Image (cartoon, helix red, strand yellow):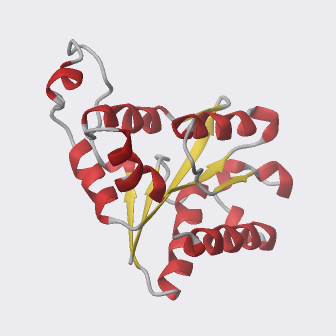
Amino acid sequence: MKALGIVFSSRANGNCSNAIKYCLNKMKNKGYEIETLNIFEYEIQGCGNCNYICFNSGECVKEDDIYKLYNRCFEADKIIFAIPTFCGHLTSQYFKFWERSQSLFKDEEECENIFLKKINLIIIGNLSSGGDMAVHEALYGFINRRFYPEVVLLSSEDYNTSSIKGNLVEFSGIRDRLDNFVEKIVSKS
């Protein structure tokens, strides 16, 4: 079994990166092979300026790293996205990654089976700055499905610390929540 973590933050040792490391190490202890990808190490172009060629041909005309990233997702059995919030929204890199999926799947069933059912979400954000709304934003990709990803919202405000410090996993309450999150992921078939 393989677990893949994708960090959607540009900070190498921030809360997203540290939360992914923590969760993947727990999964490694349960026998998973683990891999971490930092989205900012890859070139991803946004959709547009292409006349929707992918809707007709099924192929994207953009030449970037998106196929490399999605192939890593296809190879994994479990996927964890760690996504920070900026101004109450998920990062633009997350949206570019997500919107580019349109050219990758033959149909909705294939998308569900080889991609969506594997995804789980760690959202880093404070309620006072829209962290809860960012969770809903992330869940929009799962509307009208028979399943939802496991989701955990981690807030630095709850621990009287700054989100910039990247130290959330140092708090036992955060580790407890991440332990529970990992257990739920591992128990899913």
Q: In the image shown, does 148 or 166 lie closer to the viewer? A: 148
Q: In the image shown, does 49 or 189 lie closer to the viewer? A: 189
Task: Give above or below for 88 relative to 180.
Answer: above
Q: Which residue sits at x=57%, y=34%? A: 140
- Residue 119: % across, % down: 49, 55
Q: Which residue sits at x=64%, y=69%? A: 184
Quarter occupied by residue 102: top left
Q: In this view, does 98 lie to the left or right of 121?
A: left
Quarter occupied by residue 144: top right
Q: Which residue sits at x=58%, y=53%? A: 149
Q: Is residue 61 left or right of residue 42?
A: left
- Quadrant, the N terminus: bottom left
Task: Give above or below for 110 relative to 29.
Answer: above
Q: In this view, does 101 lie to the left or right of 122?
A: left
Q: Is residue 44 left or right of residue 81?
A: left
Quarter occupied by residue 48: top left
